[in-house]
Image (cartoon, coloured by chain):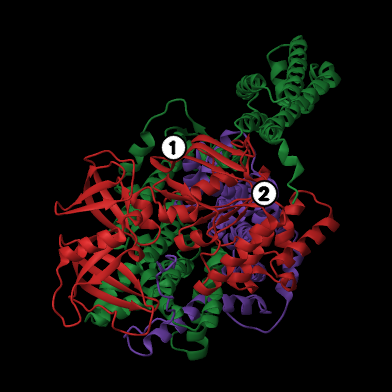
Amino acid sequence: MTYAVELVQVTKAFGDYTAVDQVSLQIKDGEFFSLLGPSGCGKTTTLRMIAGFESPTQGEILLHGQPVADLPAFKRPVNTVFQNYALFPHMTVAGNVAFGLEMLHTPRTEINQRVAEALALVRMSEFANRRPHQLSGGQQQRVALARALVNRPEVLLLDEPLGALDLKLRKQMQLELKQMQSEIGITFIYVTHDQEEALTMSDRIAVMSKGKVLQCAPPRELYERPLSRYVADFIGETNFLDGTLISSNGHAEVLIDGIVKVIAAPSSVEQGAVVTVAIRPEKLNLFSLRDEEGSLLDADSKARQLEAEEGCVSIQGTVRESIYIGTDTRYVVQLTDKTQVVARMQNFGTRFDHYLPKGEPVLVYWSVENARILLD
Amino acid sequence: MATIAASRDLGARVGAYRLRFDRAAAWLAWASGLIWVVLLLRGILFTPWLLQPGIENELMPLEASLRDLGASHGALWIGGGLLLFAAVDVGLGLWLRQGSGRARTAAFIRAAVGLGLCAAYYLITRDFVSALVLAAIQGGIVVFLTRNSGLMLAYPSMVFLGIFFVVPLFSVLAFSLGKGTALGTVNLDAPGLHNYARLLSPVGNSGLVYVTIIARTVLIALANTLICLLIAYPFAWWMARQPERMRNILMMLVMIPFWTNLLIRTYAWLIILRKDGLINNFLMDVLGVIDKPLEMTNTLGALLLGLVYGYLPYMILPLYTTIERLDKRYIEASSDLYATPWQSFWRVILPLTMPGIIAGSILVFIPSVGTYVVTNVLGGGKIYLIGNLLEQQFMTSNGDKAFGAAFGVVLTVLMLIGTMVYFRMGRKDAYA
Amino acid sequence: MTQLTTRATTTTLPRVRALPRLHLGRLALPTIGVLGFAFLYIPIVVLVIFSFNSGARLGQWEGFSLRWYESMFGDRRIMASFEVSMWVAVMSTAIATVLGTTAALALDRFKFPGRVTFDSVLYLPVIIPDIVMALSLLLFFSSANMSLNRYTVLIGHVAFNTAFVSVVVRARLATLDRRLEEAAADLYASPFAAFRRITLPLLMPGIVAGALMAFTMSLDEFVITSFISGQGDTTIPVRIYSMLRFGLKPEVNALAVVILTISSVLVVISLVLQGRSQSVTAAS
């Protein structure tokens, strides 16, 4: 099958600086695809190469199987929604939206009809005769979208299109964009540094760092099964525990700090390797080692009980901080080896008796399949 | 939803896009071919008569040179050559439009030959303007063939400024090595540094006249710059403190003298300062304080007044721009950190407005070094500066242009050194 | 997981415009302001008033009359140089605007061999005194066997005006958002179409302002013109200078006022245009 957009070993260097380093991607027709990464990771440069504003130093870009290396931007069947919209300040909203069709020498009657349709699609019909500077940020964003969509591009490129909007408007536009995309079925390539935004909207996400694609997967897989420490850290919050792999027959056994033997989820890692164990805060549970009278329980026997009854692994620790944040409580727990981990416990009821105070001795435990072994 | 049908054949579009530069080059080649044909037609129609003596005025420079070379049957050669060139250019144009790489190479060679011929044409005929036009067309073909949009855009202005600005500037250097003739031309047969030697040697009993002129000019220009700075700084500060609407109006009021003729503005002072001028009339006839008119023109004071008046706006505008942009919070921060207003000024405000001071000083200093209008009108030519000397060497019949050129070189070098030193000084003080 | 997604936008606070008082005494600054403007304008006002003087003596008011304007307009030589001035100003502005704008575009938007050198050449007229430019052109023309006439004047004016227009237009180009052109290219506009539909309209106020300034410069230029103009073909400022040399005639006042008026009007129009265009781009 041919992909809507395919990047083959694309590299872009600006002098000594390599902005994009051997990136290969396959983006399917009708997919909502996101490029996610911090600023300077090369995601915008990748987008600009697809749009035709930059040409790759090496490698090839294919649109529906055809190489487009020498095709200037104005000949490519893709359209872009720019970061700050780049609406033409000397034209009306309708003039902006009609611009692309005029450049393609579309008949006037068809232009008028399609512009009206596009403006209706983004609910901006009544603003057709305004100038861009008379519009609010959200309205400008809609016009920019209409201006790109009216051309019925094969691929729509969006460069942090919601970046300039405030939080509430951004959430609303995220939903609208996603809805619109599934209605019209155009391939979207969406650049953002906001991991939540990417998770909410995308069919697949490519996480980029320092010009490389680290992982390319659907949101759920990216969150649940990150391949590297960077991805695990960038997407959501993660606890990292350092250790050494001592056996991997079926279940991997990892030695943490030479004290506790931890069993983590299976992974194809060689024995003796230095590894990181990653566990999400919401997958960690806390068990207070103080009973109702305030006397201490035996940690080892409780740990054995947890392992036997629930298949859970546990480490002893002390609560260092507890932060109430409405839906959950965040506990910062210091383990015996001085590492700090974060656990999130949902606040089910209104009773406060679950609340663990600072200094409380606890067992941190998690079920084996929720921990992941990462190599780097 | 339908995609754009045309996008299916992307490859063909790439080719067409690349070709457009070659096509433009082809048009120029044809234009050049047309010129050859015109020259040929002219040759066919007129040469038989032209080669007869007595119709001197009708001759084109090339034809005249040919006749002078005694090439009566050379017309045949020239005609054949022109025909060949026209044919080559038309063919080349057609070939180029097909987008062949070899056609490009051929066209490059052809344009190089064309440039060589233009040079030869100039050397034979000394017909500078025609050679220039022909060479510009040949160069244009090369530029299009490079397929560099920037070069294409810049080419016309580059050629124009190269020929009419850069080349003349460097030719001053060459002419300064020659000898002025009584006819007002420059003889370059025996180049040497004699003009510079003359510049540095004493004249009769008067001592180092020329060095004195240079020193005097620099001193007066420096004095002018300093006075302008001292007046303009508080003035610009006052302007920057006015409300926004007022500021725009004041700005316009400064811009008008900035942009209007210096000669006229200097002349206006004459009405006021002359012997029979306003002030003397007022003092003598109305007040009766004096019975003899005061001598106010033709003095150093009048000269400085005229210079300050002429160049003050050049100092005000850059100062105003920097002061207006100066962030008030820096001054507040400095007084918050226990600086007195005076310390704030020296340690914070002055360094921050340094770029404006530098720009203004350069804008004032440079033209006041070269001035001769103010010295002639208000100084009565009594205070003789470099500008006056240059005017005399170039504008009067007994001037020595080669010597003047040497002075021009000295002036330019002084200026370049001065601005460089000043910029470096300023950079040390100025922020970032 | 609630990572805040605020973008790192400008962290600087809005600029505070009003400047504090320098403690030089409450009245010192306004006094300097008033005196400064008096200094700048008194000679001009005197000139304008005396151009309507009915007497022939320079410093003595003898009554209102338009006789010097009449005799100025009746003077064939003055009118001839008026014609030359206008011709040179119009032609040089037209040519220099095209050359300067293309040069500015090339320098701002493209890379090409010789770019750096060309860039510094365009700033040279600022640090080279006009008299050096004048004598270099004079030497050049005489060595190229070109006789001095209005065409040599035109060439000289085009040279400095091209440099000037290119600097003005470049300043404006620098404020234009380059993404607008990318957006146009993205919307299928060829480079030429993008220039015609987007860049040029947005650049136009800058170009017009630059052209008006160039026109004013050409009209007012004296030093270079006086070096490279031929015997018959002189412009107004050169004519005024030669009139001053051969004794003061009151027609000079009238002529000077006419030139001053034309320049001032052009300057005001150009400034208004620039101000308006700035507010448009600032709003976008």
- Packing grade of label 2 (10 A; few <14, some 14-19, many >=20) is many
Q: Which residue is mark 1?
A: B173
Question: Which chain has been coloured green in this picture?
Answer: B
Residue C6: quarter of image? bottom left
Pointer 1 indicates a residue of which chain? B
Percent of width and height locating residue B272? 52, 76
Instruction: Give A209 or A248, whichever is nearer the viewer.
Output: A248
Say if mark 2 contacts mark 1, CB within 8 Å.
Answer: no
Distance, label 2 to label 1, CA atoms, is 29 Å
Q: Secondary structure at mark 2?
A: helix
* Mark 1 neighbour density, 10 Å: few (under 14) some (14–19) many (20 or more): some
Q: Residue shown at 76%/42% (left/top)?
A: B5
* Quarter of the figure with the N terminus of chain A: top right
Compare residues A86 and A32 and report the one nearer the observer.
A32
Q: Are marks 2 and 1 on the same chain?
A: no
**What chain does mark 2 sit on?**
C
In the figure, is residue C151 to the left or right of C117? Answer: right
In the figure, what tint was chain A given? red
Residue at (16%, 53%) from the top-left corner? A257
| Nearest the eye: B138 or A81 | A81
User: How many discs mark residues in the rendered view?
Assistant: 2
Residue that numbered label 2 is attached to: C95
Task: Tell me the kind of residue under disc 1.
Answer: Leu
Give the side of residue B81 with respect to residue B331, left or right: right
Residues C247 and B309: in front is B309
Q: Position of residue C55 (x, y in %)?
A: 66, 78
User: What x and y, as percent, mark residue A255?
Assistant: 19, 49
Kind of residue at badge 2: Ile
Q: Colour of chain C?
A: purple
The answer to whether A287 is drawn above or below residue B361 in the figure is: below
The reply to whether residue C209 is in sight is no
Residue A366 image offset from top left, x and y in percent: 30, 61
